[in-house]
Amino acid sequence: MLNEPVDPELQKEQVARLRKAWETPRGWRYISAVNNTEVGVWYSLTAFAFMLMAGVMALMIRTQLAVPENDLISADRFNQLFTMHGSAMMFLFAVPMFEAISILILPGILGARDMPFPRLSAYGYWCFLIGGIFVIGSIFFDSAPNSGWFMYPPLATKAEGIGSDIWLLGLSFIEVASIAAAVELIVGALKCRPPGMRVNIMPLYAWYVMVVGGMILFAFPPLIAGDFLFEMERSLDWPFFDPERGGDPMLWQHLFWIFGHPEVYIIFLPSIAIAAMVVPTMARRPIVGYSWIVLSAVGTGFLSFGLWVHHMFTTGLPNMSLGFFSAASEAVVIPTGIQIFAFVATLMVGRVKISLPMLWIAGALAVFTAGGLTGVMVALAPFDWQVHDSYFIVAHLHYTLFGGMVFPVIAGIYYFYPFLAKKMMSERLGRWSFWLTFTGFNICFLPMHLTGLLGMPRRVYTYPGDLGWDWLNMVSTVGAFILAAGILTFAWDLVRPKGRQPQVPRNPWDAGTIEWTHDVPGEAWGVRSIPHVTSRYPLWDQPKLVERMDAGRYYLPDAEEGLRETLITTVIDAKPIQVQRVTGPAWITLMAAFFTGGAFILPTFSLYAPAIVSGAFAVVCILYWLWTATARVPEHEMKDVGLGLRLPTYASGPRAVGWWAMWITMLGDATAFASLIFGIFFYWTANSSFPPPGATHANGMLVALGTVLLVGAWAATLGARETNRRGAVPVARGLLGLALLLTIAGGASLIVSVLELEPTTHVYPAMMCALVVWISAHLIAGAVMQAYCLAGSVFGKLTPRHDADIWNVTLFWHFLVISIVVTGLMVGLFPRML
Ligand code: HEM
Ligand SMILES: [Cu+2]
């Protein structure tokens, strides 16, 4: 069948239909686009722009520090500058850049037409843009956060002005967007692979997407939970981190670094993923040690969650835990080393071409290894006691971040540029840029090791002139400007008009992976037909692949209904199971992001009522978007996808991508809840008066009643799903209505049970109220979902056969009921037993 000629007339019609279905909106409508290529490009350019702004702040810092006793920048301004430099580099550049690049190239790597939920990517992007401008813009109004990028209390809780609130609310908003993107990327890598691409032959990049996505899912929620407590302390005076009222600033440090250490690997692993694409191509041979690399990546992911305490070596923790975390920190060198050796081995046995991407990868290896060497030094607690909070640390962290992120990302941009723009970047400018960046970087940061050992602390806005630090600081500043010249050369090469330059041939690097089958000139549909893949490097091993893809002989060569479609396959073996209709251009995502932004940003200015209104509008937008675009009843149940295969066009429950997305999201949500529970046990073990003697407890009867009603709400929702499936639609509607009532009554009962508590007096009542606030917010979401299903049933969106919505809602409620029972025990029972 693969060899049969395709009728040229039919070919032409197919191409026309595909092109129409995937057409990118033009003119001002362009910003309503949702295709992964558009959103990915905006996303990466925005992250890169934030990086340049944070870089300018770094130059201002270095200018101030060039000479001793300098008064160019005031102390307070300086505090804002380094806080914003660090926060923007980490939250607005390093993490989003990975997600941006992945949204851009993952569908190509997997031979998919788009991500599974394009509108979600667009929504995530707009949230990122709005949140990022808000956070970084604060520096122009002299109101930026100024307590350092890890915001330690009490400095940050007591800080005057709205800087800390901007950090907490603005960055939480961006973290939520980051999690949304991570969910989508994981589902993409799991379910949107081409037929035949089993897990053990999928490109390493996709493996890293899963590992890093998973890490985002477990690392960001503790920080969000921390932000939630922190912001309530700032706006409501609930004393979570105030030792005078039973709180403990160390809880913040724990939550921050449970996020913060994995964050380092969240930043670093994607760069390895890029190297894993570039290195085999440049060495012209398959990667050495594929399974070792996968194992090490997964291992690093797990290990990185057990290291956070090495950021707290100087806080007076017991020696036992120092020893343990010191050893664990050294252990992570092993999987990291394996991955790096695998690349070196591939390069050694291959025939390497020193092209621009390779040059930047080589720079990355050199710089990162140097950073790793100081890393094993500071992982030893006694050494860390000496250099903690000195310029030695500033040097160490920049070596790892530049080697582990900036250099590889630039390598990746050089490598993938022709894939996206169908043009080449300049060889000459590229070499200039590399050598300027590489030398500038070392001139700037190498001396800082010494500055630090000589005792210069980080985060000081100036220093006296007779301590032997003067010339070192001057050298660093000169280096910083050379480095900036290198980065600017790169930026110019990236954006300079290349109109007169010829287009590149397809697959200019002669790579083996299928993203390079994309057409030149580019087509918005991605692949002309979705291939059957049988090798890790299909373009090297499957000689007729491209010809057959182009002829439309593989899957989904047509868009008969004018809809955007891509294939869904099974997780392990990649067997095709469904045709997924993906969403097209829309304004609603933009509006939803705008109102979500309002809900997060307005509270910074204590505008609570407008914030609630804005949040309500956001919910309405999101509901409209879901109602009109997801899980729609298809016009026909089955469809021919080519090669004699017929697949369903609708799926619900575990076969549907939406269900997977819900599962993954709820894992993140459960992690945030678990962090709050961790907080309770932390106070209980670290603090002898938790709860304080004679404390008022929540009303036990009401807590019990609320819990029982809410468990009933869960059971009724589940019952509705089952009765609906069996065709008893009226019963299902009745159960949904009942579930909604039980949710409202149970939630009210829980809220009333804690009304007697005075959360500003002590951390114990504050923590109990915080749990109830958390659950109430989830109950609102749960009630909206029940109402949504009820409306769906009444208006024919939800039928016994087409019941994806209620499957996802029950999944949400499974997780919620667990948190409800735990909350019931924590608020009603546990304190009485102490
Ligand atoms: C243009 C190149 C850069 C220069 C010249 C530079 C310079 C500096 C300097 C001098 C400090 C210390 C400020 C102080 O303690 O007073 C600093 C802090 C920091 N930098 Fe950079 N940096 C650069 C790029 C980056 C990049 C690419 C990242 C991350 C991806 C990054 C992340 C950080 C972080 C997290 C801090 C700590 C901020 C804090 O103490 O709260 N930097 N940088
Ligand atoms: Cu760490």
Image: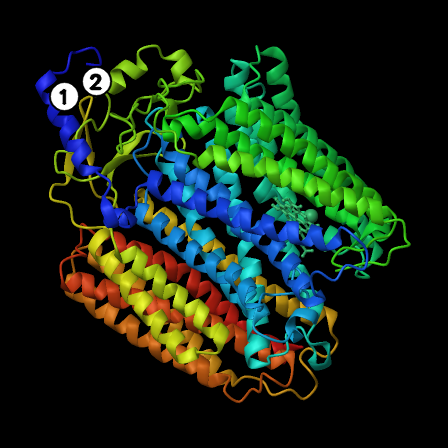
State left or right for residue 449 relative to residue 305. Answer: right
State left or right for residue 279 relative to residue 499. Answer: right
Foreground residue among 135 and 18: 135
Determine which quarter of the picture holds residue 827.
bottom right
Disc 2 residue: CB within 8 Å of ligand 1:
no
Mark 2 neighbour density, 10 Å: few (under 14) some (14–19) many (20 or more): some
Report helix, strand or loop for mark 1. Answer: helix
Mark 2 residue type? Ala
Mark-to-mark CA distance, 2 and 1: 7 Å
State left or right for residue 583 relative to residue 228. Answer: left
Q: Is residue 565 above or below residue 513?
A: below
Which label sits on residue 551?
2
Q: Residue at x 72, y 45 (%)?
A: 477
Foreground residue among 568 and 40: 40
- Image location of residue 414, percent across then percent down: 49, 28
State left or right for residue 245 relative to residue 285. Answer: right
The residue that label 1 is drawn on is: 11
Q: Residue at x 51, y 37 (%)?
A: 491
Q: Residue at x 17, y 61 (%)?
A: 793
Mark 1 residue type? Gln
Residue 243 seen in the figure: yes
Determine which quarter of the picture holds residue 244.
bottom right
- Image location of residue 137, percent across then percent down: 50, 61
Disc 1 residue: CB within 8 Å of ligand 1:
no
Determine which quarter of the picture holds residue 267.
top right
Quadrant of the rendering where the C terminus is positioned: bottom right
Label whose residue precedes the other's in the sequence (2 or 1): 1
Q: Determine whether label 2 and label 1 are within 8 Å by CB.
A: yes
Total tally of numbered discs in the picture:
2
